[in-house]
Each structure stands twice: as C-alpha cells, then as structure tokens.
Amino acid sequence: MTVQRTQFLTLDQPLALACGRSLASQAIAYQTWGTLNAARDNAILIFHALSGDSHVSGVHEDGRSGWWDLMVGPGRAFDTERYFILCANVLGGCKGSTGPTSINPETGQAYGPDFPVITLEDMVHAQRPLLRHFGIERLHAVAGGSMGGMLTLAFTQLYPEMAERAIVMAASWTNHAQAIAWNKIGRRAIMDDPKWRGGRYPVDDPPRNGLALARMIGHVTYISEGAMDEKFGRRLQSREEESFTFGVDYAIESYLSHQGTSFPQRFDANSYLYITRAIDYFDFTGDTGCSLPAAFALTRARFRIFSYESDWLYSPARHEAMTQAALAAGRDAKHHRIVAPLGHDAFLVQEQPQGDLIREFLHND
C-alpha cells in the first residue's frame, strides 16, 4: 500500500490580497495521486471543505484515511489510474499551508491575529503557482463540495482559460444570511472563550471549549433533521430514563460532544475564524452587484452542479438557480438533484449516484 505524504511548495514572491495587504512569502501544502501525462492535460484540482485538508485519499503517513476515499482512487469517480489528482490545503489553513499558526517572518512569532483577513479568491490565487510548478496550464476539471464548491466557482471565474469542467457540490454562489449567522455564532463561541486571549493563545493551551462549541454548532447545519431522527431520535445514551440533570442524556448530545471534543485536536481556532470569514465574504457576482448570469458569462467551463435533497444549508433551489444562470450565460450546465437523507454532508459519504454521474462527465469529451 502506497503511503501518502504531504509535500510543500514554498514561494518567496509576495501574494497580494483582497484586503489590501500582502504576504511576503507563503507555503502551500499539497498531495497528488496518479500520474501527470506528457501533454499535462489530465489534471484535476480538488478543493477541500472548511475543516478538510490536502489528504483526499489513501493512508497518510500519520495514519489518517482520506476524507474522500469513496470518490478518489483507482477505478473510482476521480480515477487515479486515468487522472492526475491534486489537492492543496487552503491559504489560512492549519495543515501546512501558510495561516495563523505559521511564523510571521517580520516577528519570528506565529501570526495569530496578525494574519491578514483573506478571501476565497485569495485562496485560489495562492494555488495558481502550484499548477505552474507542475507545468499545468489547463485543467481537465476543477471540483469541490461546500466551501470547496465555492472555491471551484471562484477558480472558473478567476482563471476561465484554465478550467475545462467544473463540478460544484453542496455549495452556493454566495453565503446567505442564515449561513453567515451560523458562522458568526461559531466565531463568537471561540472569541468568548477566555483562552482565546485575543488570538494569541499558546499552542499547548488553545481555546478548546470555544472551538468545540463552534464545531457542534456547525455540525448541526451539516446533517438534516430526518437523518438525525433516523440515527438518534430521542434515544437515551446510557441509561433507561432521563437523569434530570444538565449532563448527557440523549445519544445526539453524546454525538455532538464527541464532535466538539475531537475537533480541537486537529484544527486551529484562529484558522476556523479566518476560513469562516472568507466563506462569508464570498460572492460569485462580485462587488459590482452584477447578475448571476453575468457572473457565469465570465467563465468558460462546463458545469455539473450537485445538490442534495435534504441539505438545508445550501438548498437544491440555490443550485437550480446557479444552473439556470449558467445556461442563460451560454454555458454547458446541468443540475443533478441527489436523493440523500443525510443533508449537506452527503457529498462526502454517499457514493452513488454522484459517482457515476461524475465519471460520465469526466470521460465525456
């Protein structure tokens, strides 16, 4: 079994950011699967979601499994025997790419809250040199779900000549008010934790409670009401009747507690702040307030847009609106509405029918 290792590309040239600041240098952590062909035209760039990283598939050197094993690998929808798959940890992340935990060359200390506020467009621009590093000037496809779907949209607009196909899953052209509200509550949970210390917390004593609460809040939006009822219902966790305390009585409470407890062990609180803010700022139609069809007119890719029936974070109606706007702009676009009881996270855990639909799209010239 081949062990996946994270690789790094260090860039010394400045990266200008949307906020008006710049990073003098940056590192991009990435992984690859498959082989880049001689023509360098079989590459697929995958963007990860909020809490993901570059480890999409296989067994990592640290023992972790990939977050999209069911979709990426030999013979799978993103076939690593046919395509060269590339995924990088986003700018602002905490899995090797430059972010708040990185050392600020001006101070010799971690950036912390001195890291500049970034956008999804900044994240996309940061990955362009990685493609150049491999000599890739045109991608067979760019793909992603949730935040990764938004990054996919941004890529098709920022580099229209580079993307032949775009696969957008469980995403939206902009974050709606309720989604912004959920992100704000999560950030407030972190910033109200006394251990946040204005963002200057020590590595060994981060705001675990605040980040755990943020994760619990976010996780509720990723799973549908029906899926929660089916999996947990009102089942008690470890007793025959309610305890009449404020402890853990129900299985769903235990599940969320586990999600909250485990998340701070692998993710940085400041990165959570920066990445959720970048999601909030995203607007595919731009600051000029142009129409959605006009935004798609700036692209050249063929689009396949996947929604999930019980996703109440980014509803099927939003995906249909994107599809109709792409069609109005003259793009080749199709909306696949997937029956998936889990909700928003279905793109991560339900292989079919999305696997066959993606495979057909990628193979179709």
Image: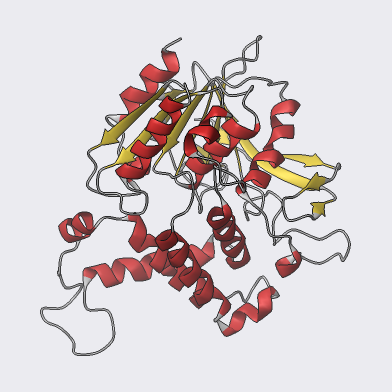
In the image, residue 49 sits, relative to residue 329, either above or below, namely below
Would residue 164 be found to the left or right of residue 22 on screen? Answer: left
Q: Does residue 59 appear anywhere in the picture?
A: yes
Q: Nearer the viewer, residue 306 or 284?
A: 284
Would residue 186 be found to the left or right of residue 270 on screen? Answer: left
Would residue 354 be found to the left or right of residue 333 on screen? Answer: left
Q: Where is residue 332 in the image (x, y as percent from the top left)?
A: 43, 20
Q: How many marks?
A: 0
Q: Residue most toward the left?
A: 240
- Residue positioned 38% across, 61% down in the render: 219
Q: Residue most toward the bottom?
A: 244
Q: Which of 207 and 225 is in front in this view?
A: 225
Q: Does residue 57 appear anywhere in the picture?
A: no
Q: Position of residue 318 (x, y in %)?
A: 36, 44
Q: How is the image coloured?
A: secondary structure
In the image, residue 80 sits, relative to residue 118, either above or below, namely above
Q: Nearer the viewer, residue 79 or 16?
A: 16
- Residue positioned 76% across, 65% down in the render: 110
Say which quarter of the image contains residue 156.
top right
In the image, residue 79 sits, relative to residue 188, either above or below, namely above
Q: Position of residue 294 (x, y in %)?
A: 53, 33
Q: Residue most toward the right?
A: 106
Say which quarter of the image contains residue 252.
bottom left
Q: Position of residue 334 (x, y in %)?
A: 36, 26
